[in-house]
Structures are given as C-alpha cells and as structure tokens.
Image: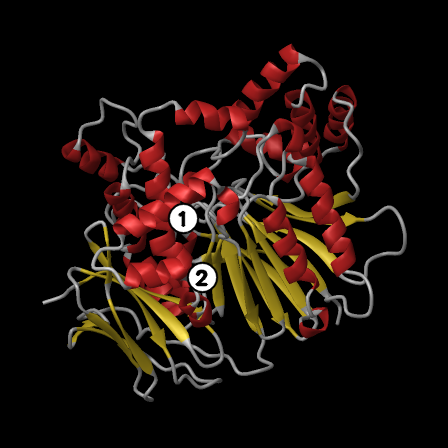
Amino acid sequence: MAELRLGPLLRYTDGSSATVWVEASRPCTAEVRCPDGAGGTARTFQVAGHHYALVPVTGLTPGTAPPYEVILDGTRVWPLPDSRFPPSVIRVPAEGDRLDVVFGSCRWAAPPADGHDPVGPDALDSLAARLAAGGERPDVLLLLGDQVYADETSETTRRWLAARRGLADPPGAEVADYEEYTRLYYESWLDPEVRWLLSTVPSCMIFDDHDVIDDWNTSAAWLADMRTTPWWQERLLSGLMSYWVHQHLGNLSPAELAADPLYAAVLGSPDGTDALRAFAAKADADPASVRWSYRRDFGRVRLLMVDTRAARVLDERNRSMLDPGEAEWLREQALADRESYDHLLVGTSLPWLLPHLIHDVETWDAALCRGERGARWAEFGERLRRAADLEHWAAFPASFAELADLFARTGSGPEAPATICVLSGDVHHAYIAEPSWPAGAPLDSRVLQLTCSPVHNSVPATIRAGFRFGWSALARFLGHRFARHGGCARPPVTWRKRGGPWFGNQLMTLTLHGRSARLRLERARRDGGLETVEESALTTS
C-alpha cells in the first residue's frame, strides 16, 4: 500500500484550479478530492528512487474554501488519523476580495518537539497555531529563500549523515547528494505545524544561497575555487534537482506545466533522474538556458519572483545580478499591461536597499574587485567580499541602477500602480526603506523596500549592532569615504529608513485591497503566539 511520505503542499491556486504536491512511498495514483466535486488525479513520477506527484485540482468555485482529502491508490492518507488540526482547505478568493500576503525567509529546520530550540520560536509554527485556533487565513505565503540549509545541518541530521557515510571527508556535515537533500526537506516539512500550514495556505518559493551553499555565486573567483573541489559538482546538481522537484514545480501554473518539456520528459519516463540531472548540468554550464523566475497574478496584484542567485553574470568587468535575458524578462513583466494591476510585488531574496554604510561598502568592494585600485586592492576586495557576504544588489552597481530605472518607469504616469514593493529577506532582520529619485517629479507609485527575515534563525549581537549603526548619519559619512576611495558613482536614488531595524523570528503581512495597502510585522513569542511589532498604512487611498 502506498503511504504519504511528505506533503501535501497546496501550491498554485487561481480562480478555478490549484495544484497539490505530494511524495508517496511507492509508484501510485494520487488523487485530491473535495466534497463539492472539485478534484483531480495524477500518477507519481520517479526521481532518485523517490515518488512524487503534482496533482492538478479543477472545478473550484470562487468565494469558497472546500476541505480536501488526499487518496493514494484508493486509500485516504490525508488528513492524518487523529489530527489535531482543522481540515486542510483550498480557499479560492472571489474577484475583488482583499489579498493577504505573508512573507519571510531563512528558516532553519526546527529541532524535535521535546528538544531545546537554540534559535528561538519558529514563526511558521506560530502562524500555524493561530490559524488552527481560528485566526484569519492568509491568501498566500511567500518563502523568499533558504527554505533548507544545505551547509548548516542540525545535530539530528549530522548523526544521520555520519551513519550513512561518515563525516571525515568533504563536505563533512553538509549535504552531498540528492538523497541527503531529501533528508533536509523531511526535517523541515514534516514539522507538524508547518506540514499542516503548507497543506492549507498556498505558497510561492524561490531559492537563496543556503539552499545550495553560503554565498552561492558570489564571484567568478569563488565559483572557480568551488569547481576545484571533488564534491561541488554533485552538491550543485543535487541542489538544483531537489529544488526543481520540491519547490519550483509548485510555483508554476497548470498551463506552464503543460508547456514544460522537462516536466513532460520526467512524467513520460519510468525514471526521470537522468533527464533532470541533464537539465541541472545544463543549468550549471549555461545559467541563461534556465529561468527560475516566475510571475503570479492574484487579481489586481502582480508578483514577480526573481532569481538573484543562478542568473548572475560573474565576470568582474561585466558583473550583473541578472543575465540579459532575465533582466529583459523582468522589464517586460513589470511594464506589460500596467493598467491591469494596482500593486507590483517584486520578490528578490536579497534586499535592493540596504543600510547606507553596507550599501557603500559593497559598491566600494565591487570597484576594488574590478581592479579600480590595482591588483593588490583587488585581491583584498575578493577576500573581503567572501568574508563579509558583500553580494547584494549594491555589489552589482549596474543592476542596482537598472532596477531603480525600471521602478521609475513602472511607477510613473496614469497607469502606475499604487505601490511597488520589493520583498526581501536574507539579512536576518526586518526594516522598511523608501527611495526617492533626485531628478524630475515624484513617482506616482509609492516604492518601498520591505525586508523580513528570519522566519527561524538568529543573528549575533555584534551583527545587530552593526545593522543599527549602518543606518546612522556617521555610517553614511563613512560610507561616502569608502565610495570616494573606490571612485564609485553616486547611486541613482537616495533612501530613508521608515521603520526598524527589528530582530527576532518574524513574518510580514501585506494586506492589499483596491489601491490600499497595509503592512503588519509580527514576531514569534516563546509561548507560541505572534506579537505585532509594527502596523502601518502604506497608502492613503
């Protein structure tokens, strides 16, 4: 009999359809069934000895939230017997309903329920507890990177790795192959609260560095060094393969899945491992051959989730956060049919706007690495870049400026949306920053950098102090001195901190209705609840 090993995860939803992701213990037919007649079936596909299905659900009615069951080869496997949680539902908002978007990043897997949690309460556990108690349900959960930590494993996982292969040889206590990646997903998504939450709230995901390795693709020199190690190739291919299976497929609509040749090849093969591995190898050799970014429309809200890791151009004289094709895709998606949306959300794991000192140091370091101050400074700049994680948008100055120009174009004129919100994580604290353009009239859209992380992780006290100092007037003065030393051009926008920095395990919620927007930041409490840290209106209409 087929058993449910992982999931279900409710992924894509629109006005009439959805997808539900599951992993089963053996090949089988997976079915999702709702009492109102909505549902669907799919055969599992196989990758590296694991059996998955992405079940398309049709027949949904706007304005309803039917519960659903998961059935494997005729046997009901979800809801779990004696579950303490309410039934999982597929909520379909009606046209004109408000949209509640919850987002965050950086979730280190929780320890066992009876163990000590070294990084404090998990914000996703707290959100699940509130929903299970009858709290208001968000419409979508955006996970903006570091869904798993391939390079920072828990004690439980290290013991499992040691029993499997020992830890003496590289990469030691880090994951090495596809099977070990699946262990990370089990550890993360089988947490009871998180498992139920992901079964009943639609989710959109994008990777960041720890999904593969810290500072992934920080520079050409870094990548060259990694490629000399005996374990890197298998680690990278396994990371991309497991991301495609566990995260990427669920980001896509049924129409996009139907047009995806790799998905068709995997479904049509008794074992899709070779096809997926060849795809990952091509993505490594030619990152421009793959698009991990995607667009989702929620009524009159447009979401653009942007790959800021695999799509980089790393040549020091031509560094870019996005390759030309990716940058053009982002421009096209932002500018197309602007009259059709009231809010533009740009999900990028790495913040566009940083504390001023950090921004200037990253821009200065990029100039050093380009050789603007000579070979010795270039060597120093590369060492500093790796040691201090100087790899955000500011470390790609041309890309920073291009994004500023895109927001100016998108946010100007009668078709401009009410808000353009850059949603980011990575930096293990939360803040709100607002840019302004020095030339010309103010934009018709309000543009905001909304940064929220971690969901479940920590930041040392010294780093907290550094982030606080980074926003100060003295820090801005020091940053200007660094920029002058590197001969750096002034950025095309200035910006101010509008809130924060806030620390702790936390989530942000955007509530969008018509052209109005409100923000709420909540922090996980030790008692399992969520406390509101900040709540404010982003628009006046």
Amino acid under label 2? Asn
3D distance between C-alphas at marks 1 and 2 = 14 Å
Residue position marked by numbered label 2 in the rendering: 251
Name the residue rendered at 34%, 55% in the picture.
Answer: 245
User: Which residue lies most toward the bottom here?
Assistant: 36
Residue positioned 74% across, 60% down in the render: 410
Callout in the foreground (1, 2): 2
Q: Which residue is mark 1?
A: 147
Residue 390 spot, x, y in % from top left: 58, 30
Quarter of the figure with residue 127: bottom left
Q: Position of residue 377 (x, y in %)?
A: 65, 14
- Identified at 33% across, 73% down, the residue is 88
Residue 100: horizontal and vertical position, in percent?
A: 54, 68
Check disc 1 and report its element: helix, strand or loop.
loop
Identify whether 418 is placed above or below 395.
Answer: below
Q: Quadrant of residue 131?
A: bottom left
Colour convention of the picture: secondary structure
